[in-house]
Image (cartoon, helix red, strand yellow):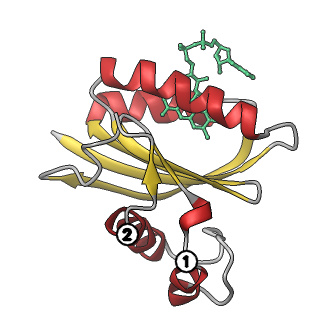
Amino acid sequence: MLVRLMYASRAVPAVDQEELVAILKKSKVNNPRVGVTGVLCFSEGIFMQVLEGGRTAVNQLYNRIAADARHSDVVLLHYDEIAERRFAGWSMGQVNMARLNPALLLKYSECAKLDPYAVSGKVSMALFDELVATAAVMGQG
Ligand code: FAD
């Protein structure tokens, strides 16, 4: 039983590049142990993350992440039972915003800004799919 979950949240002001690296490092250690894969995106204080894996593992991890004091306003955008993973190659990949074409954001939203609070979960999911398709994800494994 595989599921895919996507959420958005707002980072607390203290979260900087160093903290982001620490979160990714921790994810790369923890996630393979429980068979979770996914992608994390961080832009202008907004996190978006997709988690894939067994239902229990994904739910447990989501609950742990949601309680993390490094972010707030955690909103579930998408949850589905899936036949196969989309992000199997990443224990936790990071969207490389530097390589992101603003036109891709404009394709899905009113302005070229990542704002999952302003669009549907379906749109956020479609954006993630394109990010992966355009190889704007780094941190393999
Ligand atoms: P430890 O690292 O030993 O931490 C023990 C406790 O301290 C936990 O309650 C933890 O939340 C807290 N803590 C640790 N470091 C800090 C810090 N710098 N500031 C404040 N509190 C801290 N974890 C994953 O395993 N996989 C993920 O994919 C993942 N994605 C995340 C995405 C986001 C946006 C955020 C904010 C966090 C994410 N985390 C992820 C981290 C997660 O919330 C937990 O901190 C982590 O899983 C705890 O790991 P641990 O059980 O090994 O405990």
Residue 17: name its quadrant: top right
Residue 30: name its quadrant: top left
**How far, Cα to Cα, is label 1 from label 2?**
10 Å
Q: Residue at x 44, y 54 (%)?
A: 137
Q: Is residue 69 shown above or below 5?
A: above
Helix, strand, or loop for circle 1?
Answer: loop
Helix, strand, or loop for circle 2?
Answer: loop
The 10 Å Cα crowd at callout 2, few under 14, some 14 to 19, many 20 or more, is few
Residue 104 percent location from the top left of the image: 51, 81
Q: Which kind of residue does numbered mark 1 sit on?
A: Asn
Please give the label number shown on residue 51: none
Disc 1 target residue: 101
Quadrant into which the C terminus falls: top left
Q: Residue at x 54, y 56 (%)?
A: 96
Q: Which kind of residue does numbered mark 2 sit on?
A: Thr
Residue 46 percent location from the top left of the image: 70, 56
Quadrant into which the N terminus falls: top left
Q: Is residue 117 left or right of residue 54?
A: right
Query: Do the residues under discs 1 and 2 have CB atoms within 8 angstroms?
Result: yes
